[in-house]
């Protein structure tokens, strides 16, 4: 939120320069995100008055102007091409020697043979607006000869503050002025806003059909408004400094009141409103064309402003095009209302909208500020665009308006949470400075928050306010005194840090992504898995809960490749969400990783080779080693839609599925625009990292014996089946099984593969004889032939 310091100083006496003011507001909870000058640097520009404007004899689009500079001498002759240059206009005059933004120096010159001793400037040329249709128009009372910087207070500073979501009351000049009052103890100087005298008796009936959602509404008819006129320079400049652009007098005034008082307003073209106003919920088959031309369909959960023909606006969000105020509007109906935050929250996002009004109503608007805002807007419209105001129509349901209750803050709790003792007078001064009614009690204080403070409901809220105003920097630094207990680490589970460090040591970097993911990306990866949808998503690309950690990893890989980071090793430890009976969601603790790009960093000694399935399989095997039960893990060929049909595997532990491993499907790689195919893995963290209790195993004193066996078998038989049969037969004598050759080609039947195993045998109690080992190898060969269809190669 942008606030000009000059505007703030009209409301309260600020004792500090702009930078210190921003620092103090930061310490009070309103972070200063930026401090900028109200206008770029320029010199030599004054208020000038055009005395005459005559057509240039040599150019149709130029005029020769005589301009008074307030010096008492002869008027200056200035050649100007602006279409609005005319006699009697007071405007910005850059005299000879002036320096304009962009380094432009004004010199005496001849334009088409006519001498020009200066330049009449537009707002764009002075850096005050992005575009201008003519030279700057100043009010008739602007003092000729005065510096333009001084007249428009262009040496002003603009604060850009970050207002937290719980402080909707602070999203205005009034709100920040209240904070300065609380910090300084100075008095608030609000503008005097007298009630407008009614010039006619015309009213528009108002009906509140949803009093819980809209318990307060005020309206007024103003006739005879000249909306073709231009807003005065001071108003346009105020809006510009606050980040708004000038549109028309009526719209400018409603925006001005929004920025000044924090109360959103809306103006309707009275001639287009049919038979009164009703605040109600949307109905089936209704539609509304919004300002800007977009059409929406409000349902029975969306509050609308309607007339006899249907909705004319989304309540608290945006008005409709049918009743919009335009240049030809002469009679208008002004609306100012109070909408309950829960009636507006989420509705703007539902339609992909984000407006100043919805932002304030969602956070909470002062429920007793509507009539003051109406009188302020009426006064400004009549002053700027003329018109005759009518009587104020007010509809209120007091029983549905918010009412604050006293909150008790205990001295003992205050001291405990702050770790320091603040004097009673300082505590009371802080609370009273925020507009609270404070009374002392036996235990501490009772404070009644003002109506606009929706964020104060319990004791810690008041304690937060006290420390916010007193200053965290004033609290003494105290060493932690809480008991520190070492939590026992169960032996049956390796520490999380050691598991994650295993991946880190293998070149992986940890990421932390949102649990909300893009529904389109997740649907592409897991088309058969229903994703839990969010009822009120924060963005359209964060609308469902993740059913896997892979969407976050893939999205991160895409973003990194856009930044020319092509070699990636990423992992994440977090929860995924699986559908459960009854429409519930089950959280599953998961560990997932992604590898993409070259196997090794670029170097001279090794050619670049892309990472493949086996590389990532080795990383997963390093993880399983951390459990101390590596033999309990196996890999089994499997398919899921998002993985390459021939390069995917299910990860099993003791026969139970604990995860997946594989290369991303080529079609998905192409659709996402990835360079190279990433290889991913995902594990059920609890099942995959569960470890056995450490057991002592003595080392055998007897020698090992190695025997090799070579055979062919059907291509479809996996190594895991071979390992299973050999382990079953060799029992405790098998120390290791090594695959040292797999061959397909000449000499091997089509559809079969040749495999060679090295088997290491050892007994703990005696030396194995050749006869023992030969008998065991014979049994293994017989079993492989009979069970797996192997053919032994001699």
Image: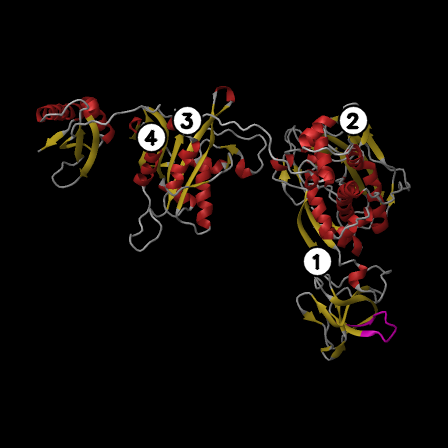
Q: Looking at the rendering, which quadrant does residue 270 occupy?
A: top right
Q: In x, y percent, where is residue 783?
A: 15, 23
- Taking depth in this image into account, of 37 and 584 the one nearest to the observer is 37
Q: In x, y percent, where is residue 62?
A: 74, 71
| Left or right of 408 in this view: 648 | left
Number of the front mark, 4 or 2: 2
Q: State the residue position of label 3.
A: 686
Q: In the rendered image, is residue 428 in sight? A: yes
**Where is 441 relative to 193, above or below?**
above
Q: Looking at the rendering, which quadrant does residue 683 occupy?
A: top left
Q: Is residue 72 magenta?
A: yes
Q: In x, y percent, where is residue 50?
A: 83, 68
Q: How many marks?
A: 4
Specify which label sits upstream in the sequence, 1 or 4: 1
Q: State the residue position of label 1.
A: 129
Tell me how far mark 2 sits from mark 1, CA to CA: 50 Å
Specify which label sits upstream in the sequence, 3 or 2: 2
Secondary structure under tag 1 reads loop
Secondary structure under tag 4 reads strand
**Mark 1 surroundings within 10 Å by alpha-carbon count, few (fewer than 14), some (14 through 19), many (20 or more):** some
Marker disc for residue 446:
2
**Mark 4 surroundings within 10 Å by alpha-carbon count, few (fewer than 14), some (14 through 19), many (20 or more):** many
**Where is 722 relative to 507, above or below?**
above
């Amino acid at each position: 939120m942008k606030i000009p310091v000059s505007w703030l100083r009209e409301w309260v006496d600020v004792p500090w320069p702009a930078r210190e003011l921003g620092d103090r507001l930061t310490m009070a909870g309103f972070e200063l995100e930026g401090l900028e000058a109200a206008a770029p640097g320029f010199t030599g520009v004054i208020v000038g008055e055009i005395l005459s404007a005559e057509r240039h004899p040599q150019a149709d689009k130029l005029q020769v102007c005589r301009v008074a500079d307030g010096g008492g001498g002869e008027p200056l002759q200035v050649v100007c091409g602006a279409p609005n240059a005319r006699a009697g206009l007071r405007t910005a005059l850059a005299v000879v020697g002036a320096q304009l933004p962009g380094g432009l120096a004004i010199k005496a010159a001849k334009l088409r043979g006519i001498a020009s001793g200066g330049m009449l400037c537009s707002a764009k040329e002075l850096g005050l607006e992005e575009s201008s249709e003519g030279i700057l128009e100043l009010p008739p009372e602007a003092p000729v000869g005065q510096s333009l910087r001084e007249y428009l207070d262009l040496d002003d500073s603009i604060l850009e503050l970050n207002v937290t979501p719980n402080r909707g009351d602070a999203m205005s000049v009034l709100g920040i002025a209240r904070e300065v009052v609380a910090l300084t103890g100075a008095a608030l100087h609000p503008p005097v806003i007298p009630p407008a005298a009614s010039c006619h008796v015309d009213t528009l009936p108002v009906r509140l059909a949803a009093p819980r959602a809209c318990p307060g509404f005020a309206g007024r008819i103003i006739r005879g408004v000249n909306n073709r006129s231009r807003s005065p320079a001071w108003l346009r400049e105020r809006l510009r400094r606050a980040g708004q652009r000038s549109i028309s007098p009526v719209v400018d005034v409603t925006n001005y009141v929004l920025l000044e008082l924090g109360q959103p307003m809306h103006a309707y073209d009275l001639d287009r409103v049919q038979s009164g106003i009703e605040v109600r919920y949307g109905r089936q088959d209704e539609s509304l064309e919004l300002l800007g031309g977009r059409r929406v369909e409000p349902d029975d959960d969306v509050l609308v402003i309607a007339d006899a023909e249907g909705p004319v606006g989304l309540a608290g969000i945006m008005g409709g095009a049918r009743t919009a105020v335009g240049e030809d509007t002469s009679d208008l109906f002004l609306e100012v209302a109070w909408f309950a935050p829960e009636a507006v929250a989420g509705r703007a996002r539902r339609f992909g909208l984000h407006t100043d009004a919805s932002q304030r109503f969602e956070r909470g608007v002062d429920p007793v500020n509507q009539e003051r805002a109406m009188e302020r807007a009426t006064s400004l419209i009549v002053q700027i665009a003329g018109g005759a105001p009518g009587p104020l129509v007010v509809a209120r349901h007091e029983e549905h308006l918010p009412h604050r209750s006293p909150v008790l803050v205990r001295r003992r709790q205050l001291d405990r949470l702050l770790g320091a003792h603040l004097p009673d007078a300082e505590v009371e001064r802080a609370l009273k400075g925020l507009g609270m009614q404070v009374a002392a009690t036996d235990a501490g204080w009772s404070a009644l928050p003002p109506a606009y403070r929706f964020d104060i409901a319990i004791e810690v809220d008041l304690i937060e306010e006290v420390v916010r105003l007193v200053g965290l920097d004033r609290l003494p630094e105290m060493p932690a005194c809480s008991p520190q207990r070492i939590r026992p680490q169960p032996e049956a589970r390796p520490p999380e840090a050691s598991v994650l460090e295993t991946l880190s040591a293998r070149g992986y970097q940890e990421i932390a992504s949102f649990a909300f993911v893009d529904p389109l990306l997740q649907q592409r990866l897991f088309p058969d898995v229903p994703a839990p949808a969010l009822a009120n998503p924060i963005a359209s690309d964060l609308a469902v809960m993740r059913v896997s950690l892979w969407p976050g990893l893939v999205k991160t890989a895409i973003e990194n490749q856009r930044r020319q980071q092509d070699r990636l090793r990423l992992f994440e430890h977090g929860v995924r969400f699986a559908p459960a009976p009854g429409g519930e969601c089950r959280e599953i603790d998961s560990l997932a990783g992604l590898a993409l790009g070259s196997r090794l960093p670029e170097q001279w000694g090794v050619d670049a080779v892309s990472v493949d399935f086996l590389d990532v399989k080795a990383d997963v095997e390093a993880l399983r080693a951390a459990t101390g039960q590596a033999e309990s893990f196996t890999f089994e060929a499997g398919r899921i839609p998002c993985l390459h049909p021939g390069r995917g595997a299910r990860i099993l532990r003791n026969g139970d599925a604990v995860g997946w491993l594989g290369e991303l499907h080529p079609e998905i790689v192409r659709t996402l625009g990835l360079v190279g195919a990433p290889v991913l893995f995902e594990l059920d963290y609890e099942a995959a990292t569960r470890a056995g209790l450490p057991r002592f195993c003595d080392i055998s004193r007897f020698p090992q014996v190695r025997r090799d066996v070579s055979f062919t078998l059907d291509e479809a038989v996996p190594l895991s089946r071979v390992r299973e049969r050999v382990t079953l037969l060799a029992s405790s004598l098998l120390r290791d099984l090594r695959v040292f050759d797999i061959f397909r080609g000449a000499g091997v039947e089509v559809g079969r593969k040749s495999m060679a195993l090295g088997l290491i045998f050892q007994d703990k109690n005696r030396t194995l004889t050749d006869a023992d080992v030969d008998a065991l190898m014979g049994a293994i060969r017989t079993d492989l032939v009979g069970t797996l269809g192997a053919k032994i190669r001699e």
